[in-house]
Each structure stands twice: as C-alpha cells, then as structure tokens.
Image (tube, rainbow, N blue to C red):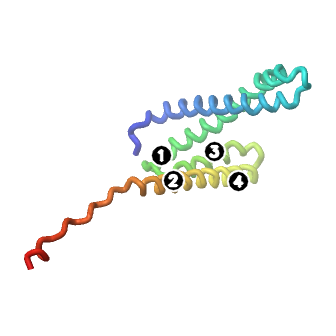
Amino acid sequence: MDHTRDPCPWVILNDFGGAFAMGAIGGALWHGVKGFRNSPVGERRIGAITAIKARAPVLGGNFSVWGGLFSSFDCAIKGIRKKEDPWNAISAGFFTGGALAIRGGYKAARNGAIGCAVLLAVIEGVGIGFQRMFAASTKLELPPPPPSNEKALA
C-alpha cells in the first residue's frame, strides 16, 4: 500500500475540494467563452461574467460530487481488498457511475456504471503503458565484461 498518502478521510475531503476547484475553473473558462459568444456585440463582457457567475459553481459542484464519490468508493475498496492496484480505480468508477445514474432507473445505472468503469480502465491502461514506456528508458544495463586474460596467456 502507498503509505505516503494521507488517511482515507483526508484523501476524500481533499479530492472533494480538488474536484470542485477543477470543475469551477474549467466551468469559468467554458461558460465564459459560451457567454461571450452568445451575447449581443455591445454586452459581451457582461454576458461572459454573468454566465460564469451563474454556471461555473454548478459545474464545480458536479465535479465535486463525482470526485468525492469516486474517492469514497476507492477508499472503501482499498479497505476491503487490502490491495492497491488498478482494479480499485476501475471498481470505484463502476460504483460511482452507477450511483450517479441510479435515479434514472436500473438501465441507466447499469449503463452509467459500465461506461464509467470502461473510462477508468482506459485511463488506468494508458497510465500503465506510459509507466512501462518511460521505465524502459531508465533501466540500467550492465557494462560488457572486461576481456579475459585466458586468451592472452595461451
């Protein structure tokens, strides 16, 4: 297990906050551009600011819910399995996608769970691929052995 990270309750709170910040900043950029483009020519700046104030916190909250649920499920799975591997993230993604879509019924929850698990599997697979690709360049190779003296004596 990775003992350099904080205990799970602190990780969950940290992930809630980090996800909110990421969503709010991304939402400010997205909705700022959208508000600017959808406003009349003379009121584009005020339209952008109004759109940011109205929609960026909502997107931050949505990201926060996803990040907090994912982190909660990830910590629970780590506690149950007593392992830290990519299957934890994939399973946590499965449970997060299902939990967020459960209000839409069984089919929506199933599809959300499978979609989220596949997304997390792709992310984990790409991460493992990059680790292996970059680890190969840092692998130490032994120098060739020095010439033996047996041939020189003969």
Helix, strand or loop under label 1: helix
In this rendering, is residue 64 above or below 139?
above
| x and y percentages locating residue 125 in the rendered image | 55, 55
Q: Are marks 1 and 3 in contact (CB under 8 Å)?
A: no
Mark 3 or mark 2, which is nearer to you?
Answer: 2
Q: How many dots with numbers?
A: 4
Residue beneath disc 1 = 78
Amino acid found under the numbered disc labelled 3: Thr
Residue, x 59% and y 54% (percent of image)? 121
Disc 4 crowd, CA 10 A, few/some/many (<14, 14-19, 20+): some
Instruction: Measure how far apart labels 4 and 3 are at the Cα level.
Output: 11 Å
| x and y percentages locating residue 104 in the rendered image | 77, 45
Amino acid found under the numbered disc labelled 2: Phe
Amino acid found under the numbered disc labelled 1: Lys
Residue beneath disc 3 = 96
Instruction: Measure how far apart labels 4 and 2 are at the Cα level.
Output: 30 Å
Q: Would residue 101 appear left or right of 35 to someone viewing this image? A: left
Residue beneath disc 4 = 110
Mark 2 or mark 1, which is nearer to you?
Answer: 2
Q: Which of 84 and 132 is in front in this view?
A: 132
